[in-house]
Amino acid sequence: MLTDRSKVVVKKEMTLTERLYLPAIVGGILITIRHFFRKSATIRYPEKKREISDIWRGQHVLKRDDEGAERCTACGLCAVACPAEAITMVAAERKPGEEKLYREEKYASTYEINMLRCIFCGLCEEACPKEAIFLTDRIIETDYTRKGFVFGKDKLVEPVAERVDVTKRQTKDVLDFKKHKEYSHNK
Amino acid sequence: MAKVTIDGIEIEVQDGTTILNAARQIGGDSVPPAMCYYSSLKDSGGKCRVCLVKVAQGSAKDPRPMPKLMASCRTPVMDGMVVQSITSPEVLEARKSVVEFLLINHPLDCPICDQAGECDLQNLAYKHGVGQTRYEEEKRTFEKIDIGDKIKLHMTRCILCYRCTFVANQITDNRVHGIIGRGDASEISTYIQKAVDNDFSGNMIDVCPVGALTDKTFRFKSRVWFTNPLDAHRDCKKCSGKVVLWTKGEEVLRVSARTDQYNEVKEFICNECRFDHKIKSDWIIEGPRHIDRHSVIAQNHYEKSDLQKLKKEIDRQIEFEKGKLLSPNNPG
């Protein structure tokens, strides 16, 4: 016996009220009607959204630095930290003249996250040595195909015009640490 | 023959063996790390100072301790010598400081560097170093140099171990590669950037403990832990032909020589094997390369484990732990 909720089946003759059938039906309908007046458990999602935490782990963003250059250097630490193996990338060498586009001499020419695989654990963010990847409070949009869930750089890199604010995802310790210029490797 | 005690373990070795090699015969944790010593290169060692050990007793005849920590790769053993490696807090402290010194001018651009994941300096710093730097001044920087069309030199990352110059000196003919300048300004260089096109020049890449000399054909192709290392060989007239193929699917991204447990190449390979045969069908594949399970390269890497080897390793570890307890500093 796996649970203590099992019941012994009793096969006894039904009483007259039980055999009448209608009382049971009316009882069922009453239960249904009662639920009309209860508070609904669901919300009408796209129109109404539930409140979520500031540090909600939703869609990733690949940050740019203050000058607008991509921070990601395709070091692969996010991919190796990813327990779901959702991240793949291809690195490329920065050419002369592209200093404004990419911060380091190596950059990710393709960077893909499979959002169906991703479990939004935030380990990629933790592993990133360049403060390039962050999870944001955006929820992944639905799609009809699996292909649509493989997010490339077009969806992940933040546009220069509309930056994504991630300051709330950084703890006080991290922000304090950043004040020490001598510890910074990203000069 | 000389009897020497290292971290409480006694071993008899040939006269003239260095402390480092005696420790390697014992194996285990008391083997001092080495960044510049290279067993297959003559005269290497004595430069990086990470292999410092304490000699508590000089020899049976003269039992005085040596006044300073000794570079174990350059100090020959004497009969009755007592050496402390990891059992001496002084040695561990010294190693920590040496790591800090080595990292002073190292750019710490591991996220970019192709050596990351198989870098001796990275391992050393991880094991012995401290997590943060106290150095506030500007690091020295150099321009990147192409040594020939196959090797890239990042002088900024160099720790001046001189291994590559020994390769140039001892393995290749017609040496065009050496070190110019002194002290802080010393620099690995070729004669007016003359290409190193000797048959064995590619071995500089393998002996380099950091990412200063890297394979240009592998540059930024893949992080080393996303590749699948395979042991392979081919008939080669110039070298042994025994290599490691670093593959991704059917593609051979890089070919390197096989290294031993101390990351040292015993059989150097020629440039033809290294650079010109990047198709799997050119090689006879023996099977997956053995990768230490603590290495990041062991991610998604599967190999058949040798149970007898494993047992030997465990036995050795147990013996080592016993020896640690018997050492003069930790009597029981």
Image (cartoon, coloured by chain):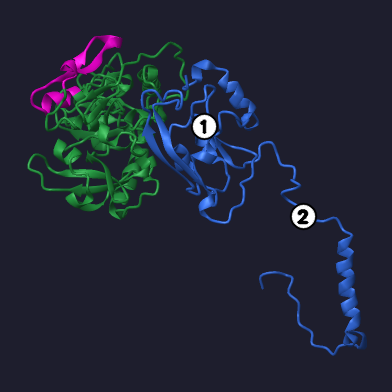
Chain colours: A blue, B green
* Amino acid beneath label 1: Ala
Q: Which residue is mark 2?
A: A42
**Distance from label 1 to label 2 (Cα)?**
36 Å
**Disc 2 crowd, CA 10 A, few/some/many (<14, 14-19, 20+):** few
Q: Secondary structure at mark 2?
A: loop
* Horizontal and vertical percent position of residue B100: 40, 19
The secondary structure type at the circle numbered 1 is loop
Q: x%, y% of residue B4?
A: 23, 29
Q: Chain of mark 1?
A: A
Residue A65: mark in rendering: none
Question: How far from the left and from the top, in percent, is residue B21?
Answer: 22, 31
Q: Find the magenta span and give its range.
A: B165-194
Residue A17 x/y as whole percent: 92, 85
A25 relative to B205, above or below: below
Pick whichever, B291 or B173, lies toward us.
Answer: B173
| Amino acid on which the number 2 mark rests in the picture | Thr
Q: Quadrant of the N terminus of chain B?
A: top left
Task: Tell me if I can see residue A117 in this picture.
Answer: no
Q: Quadrant of the rendered structure where residue A174 is?
A: top right
Name the quadrant containing residue A35. bottom right
Residue B180 inside the magenta-drawn segment: yes
User: Are labels 1 and 2 on one chain?
Assistant: yes
